[in-house]
């Protein structure tokens, strides 16, 4: 009964008292052994005990919202954004107090090993979004709408964006391009109640039209087109625009022309903020062609890939030489009396070799402790 009372602590005393009396009267009609089994089943859980009975969780930090971003923009404070794809990377980004976490479709390349962003699906993106959302308790979360999830119609665009919020736990979505169709999609999504971040300049989803991953707006006509597309997306209701791989003067001009923040990636220092990919800035070497495709604009703040590679190689070497795990990392013990009992039972069953193996390993553990 003490178990029941412990579980019911969060309830009112009156309700708990009534239920305990009811359970008590019910218990008297059931054999004791059966009651124990039922009690154990009733309070079993697939979660670890310290999660089930952990009590109130730590208060959530104050989240970054669109209002936060607008305030920073109005105060001319640079906005930071990092592209990440899973729980541990999201935790790192969040604890670094980065403003925006973008769950990018670049996961197709960085995580899944494709040569472009095109293959990743909306369902795959939603898995990444949910994982990142579990790790980020503070950052404003933006989910990339992948290629093929919003081009067919505005209805498709709204449906995909809605799934990003309902199933992916995102705060907003991002779409690429500033053509009339993309502007219409952005407007429809905003009118449906979903915040949208635009993206002009190099748009990786349009790599087949652009003829590869190449810088944009390096001639006057292209620069004007980038500016016009950014203005059109702003007119459609986008709260921010990513400018990718455009010359710094062009990014400065677009930033000056807009009344919403610009986030630069390979676009110089005059934008309202900056974004880099988690794996790139850490030097993770996750892409199969990393040495060839690491963007020229990416500053590596660490060489985490080399540290990881070295650690894994050391582990492999220690396994090969049998120095790992050793006694230091074999923490679970069994009393000598139990070893003797087990060995006797094994011998009684004619398993002499197995009995010896048990005894020899037990002896080795003791002598190397």
Image: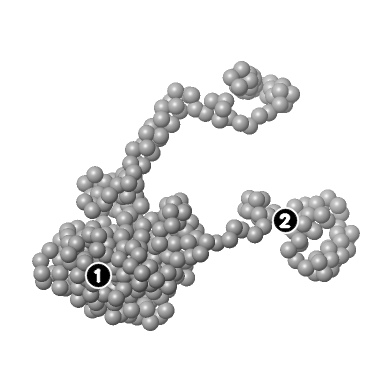
Name the residue at 86% across, 61% down.
24
- Foreground of the two, 250 or 16: 250
**Snapshot quadrant of residue 13:** bottom right
Coordinates of residue 361 in the picture (x, y in percent): 60, 21
Residue drawn where x is 82% and y is 54% of the image: 2
Image point 34% across, 38% down: which residue?
306
Say few, some or many: other residues with alpha carbon within 10 Å of mark 1 (under 14 / 14 to 19 / 20 or more).
many
Sequence-earlier tag: 2 or 1? 2
- Residue 92 seen in this snapshot: yes
**Where is mark 1, residue-wise?**
255
Res. 43 mark: 2
Quarter of the rendering occupied by the N terminus: bottom right
Place of residue 122 in the rendered image (x, y in percent of width and height, measured from the top left): 37, 65
| Relative horizontal placement of residue 167, taking residue 121 as reference (left or right) | right
Q: In this view, does 133 lie to the left or right of 290?
A: right
* Secondary structure of the residue carrying numbered label 1: helix
Percent coordinates x, y for residue 127 in the rendering: 43, 60
Please state the horizontal and vertical placement of residue 115, each as a whole percent of the image. 25, 53
């Amino acid at each position: 009964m003490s178990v029941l009372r412990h579980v019911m602590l969060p309830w009112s005393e009156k309700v708990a008292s009534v239920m305990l009396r009811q359970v008590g009267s019910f218990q008297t009609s059931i054999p004791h052994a059966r009651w124990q089994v039922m009690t154990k089943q009733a309070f079993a859980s697939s979660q670890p005990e310290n999660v089930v009975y952990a009590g109130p969780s730590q208060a959530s930090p104050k989240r970054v919202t669109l209002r936060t971003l607008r305030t920073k923009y109005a105060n001319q404070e640079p906005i930071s954004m990092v592209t990440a794809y899973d729980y541990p990377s999201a935790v790192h980004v969040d604890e670094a107090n980065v403003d925006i976490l973008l769950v990018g479709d670049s996961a197709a390349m960085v995580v899944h090993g494709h040569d472009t962003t095109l293959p990743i699906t909306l369902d795959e993106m939603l898995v990444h979004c949910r994982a990142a959302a579990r790790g980020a308790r503070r950052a404003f979360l933006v989910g990339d709408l992948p290629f093929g999830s919003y081009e067919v119609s505005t209805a498709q665009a709204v449906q995909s964006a809605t799934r990003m919020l309902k199933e992916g736990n995102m705060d907003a979505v991002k779409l690429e391009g500033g053509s009339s169709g993309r502007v219409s999609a952005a407007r429809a999504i905003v009118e449906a109640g979903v915040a949208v971040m635009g993206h002009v300049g190099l748009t990786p989803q349009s790599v087949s039209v652009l003829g590869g991953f190449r810088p944009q707006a390096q001639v006057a006509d292209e620069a004007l087109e980038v500016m016009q597309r950014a203005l059109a997306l702003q007119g459609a209701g986008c709260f921010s625009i990513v400018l990718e791989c455009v010359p710094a003067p062009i990014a400065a001009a677009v930033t000056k022309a807009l009344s919403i923040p610009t986030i630069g990636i390979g676009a110089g220092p005059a934008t309202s903020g900056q974004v880099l990919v988690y794996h790139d800035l850490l030097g993770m070497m996750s892409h199969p062609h990393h040495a060839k495709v690491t963007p020229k604009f990416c500053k590596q703040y660490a060489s985490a890939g080399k540290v990881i590679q070295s650690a894994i190689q050391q582990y492999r070497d220690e396994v090969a030489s049998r120095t790992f795990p050793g006694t230091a990392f074999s923490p679970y013990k069994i009393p000598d009396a139990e070893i003797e009992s087990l060995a006797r039972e094994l011998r009684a069953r004619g398993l002499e070799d197995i009995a010896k193996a048990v005894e020899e390993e037990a002896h080795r553990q003791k002598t190397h402790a």
